[in-house]
Amino acid sequence: MTAVEPPITETPARTVPAEAEVAIVGAGFSGLAMSIKLSALGIDDHVVLERGQKAGGTWWFNTYPGCGCDVPSHLYSFSFAPNPDWTRTYSRQPEIEAYLQRVADDFGVTPKLRLGTTVTGAEWDEENSRWVVETSGGDVRARVLVSAAGALSDPKTPDIEGIETFKGHMFHSAQWDHDYDVAGKRIAVIGTGASAIQFVPASAPAVAQMHVFQRTAPWIMPHTDRPISKRERRLYKRFPALQKLVRGGIYSARELLVLGFVKQPRLMKVVERLARKHMDSQISDPELRRKVEPGYTIGCKRILPSNKWYPALGRDNVELVTDGVTEVREHSIVTVGGEEVEVDAIIFGTGFAVTDMPVAKYLRGRGGRTLDEHWKGSPRAHLGTTVPGFPNLFMLLGPNTGLGHSSMVYMIESQVAYVIDALKAMRRRGAATAEVKAEAVRDFVEDLDAKMQDTVWNTGCSSWYLDDTGRNATLWPDWTFAFRRRAARFDESEYEIAAGRGA
Ligand code: NAP
């Protein structure tokens, strides 16, 4: 008789701490800034949960050809970690990713990161005043939860009839398949947004044929990207104040755009003239010129800078298709006009889930209610950060903190300062919980919605800025320094601050 071995039950290795003062979801710009500032405050008992294999967030995930930032390098970096070594005035993805990983090392927060760790849920434990954060590496019980998951992190692909029957290759720009060689292939690109205008010019020379399916023509401005010379870099290194001055100049110049976006949309006509001149100078084919003419006020959707987009569309092996897509078959795409285009691969440049952010589905506050249920299709948060019914939850880059004209890093630093001030206030009061009052959110959102009324984003275009109810739940409708001023101080009168277990 042979002995029966007991079955081996494998329990996945715990990779996260069981308890933490603060749990941060995401190790992109916002999660890293939060971790750095918490460490500076002496809150070392925190953990950063990141599903990517390295830090960097969107700058680790997006590796498509030509990927870069359309905000100038000197402004698209932390104010507390200037980088005199940027090699271009507008950085490319590998340099930004390396910058973020270096900053994490330099500020000593790399050990706080738990990489390859996916957060699958988080629920408020009423009795113990703790967030129970469920991750692929085990649960973490944290007093404070900071959602730094990013607004543009979950790729969206369209639900086109027959798409599941396609026998070729398919991927989204944010999940670029580098093992698939596009050289010599017939490629369909769906979408003409910020990502497509970068990867189409970068990939078009190699492919046999590219069909770019455009639903809405974007407004394109000339790009002022150029290399930063070694001499300039030496100067920035030697005189950090000079780099600060340049950063300040860029910030102020960009802030002037708020006049056109928010205060006086008719001023956008000036910008529109510049964009049209760019179009005319780069396109000689009248048919293509007709197809790329946008049908809405410039700025209503994100303005895209590129000197390569129109020339790419003008290539012999590139076709701009303005007829909608109705169906995908085994080896082809069928347009509304009935044309069938045979392709080997489909690349989606179709953007991200923004106002329907997945994080809202798995965050459960008081009574087990999800953020999604609370928002009912229209995200609202005080200063884009706190939500009633979700005590001790702080969102970075939450609703209405987005920008169409300047650096998100500025908004992130403003919000991080707010969270730090909140934690200081809680500590001072010996509080277990801080929960924003519903009236505070109501007043904040009423003011915001009123300011939104006359902005360029309300001039009649459909954009990913708008939520299911048609409300702009994405952008900040004012000067960015006005946001910073409001977020500079945590106003305790706007919160229910309570003592309790776990204080
Ligand atoms: P996006 O700007 O949202 O563009 C998505 C594109 O896909 C649009 O042209 C959209 O057309 C089209 N589309 C979506 N669903 C479609 C469907 N069902 N059928 C046909 N076309 C469809 O996405 P993205 O280009 O990935 O950029 C997203 C955001 O990421 C940007 O706005 C920007 O904030 C950020 N980003 C920044 C940089 C940077 O340089 N800093 C670079 C890349 C991305 P419609 O316009 O008609 O909706």
Image: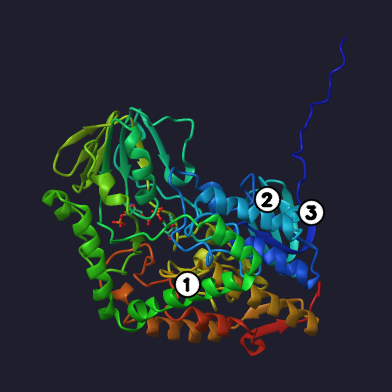
Give the spatial CA distance, label 3 vs label 2: 11 Å
Q: Nearer the viewer, residue 5 or 130?
A: 130
* Category of crowding for the residue at label 3, using alpha-carbon neighbours closer than 10 angstroms: few (below 14), some (14–19), many (at least 20): some
Depth-wise, is mark 1 or mark 3 nearer the camera? 1
Q: Quadrant of residue 459?
A: bottom left
Q: Residue at x 44, y 30 (%)?
A: 180
* Category of crowding for the residue at label 2, using alpha-carbon neighbours closer than 10 angstroms: few (below 14), some (14–19), many (at least 20): many
Ligand 1 visible in quadrant: bottom left
For label 3, the residue is: 17
Considering every residue shown, the one lying at the far left of the view is 286
Disc 1 on helix, strand or loop? helix
For label 2, the residue is: 135
Q: Amino acid at mark 1?
A: Ile
Q: Amino acid at mark 3?
A: Pro
Give the spatial CA distance, label 1 vs label 3: 42 Å
How far across and down, in percent of the image, does residue 460 sit?
25, 71
Circles 3 and 2: CB atoms closer than 8 Å? no
Q: Visible in this render: residue 458?
A: yes
Circles 2 and 1: CB atoms closer than 8 Å? no
Q: Amino acid at mark 2?
A: Thr
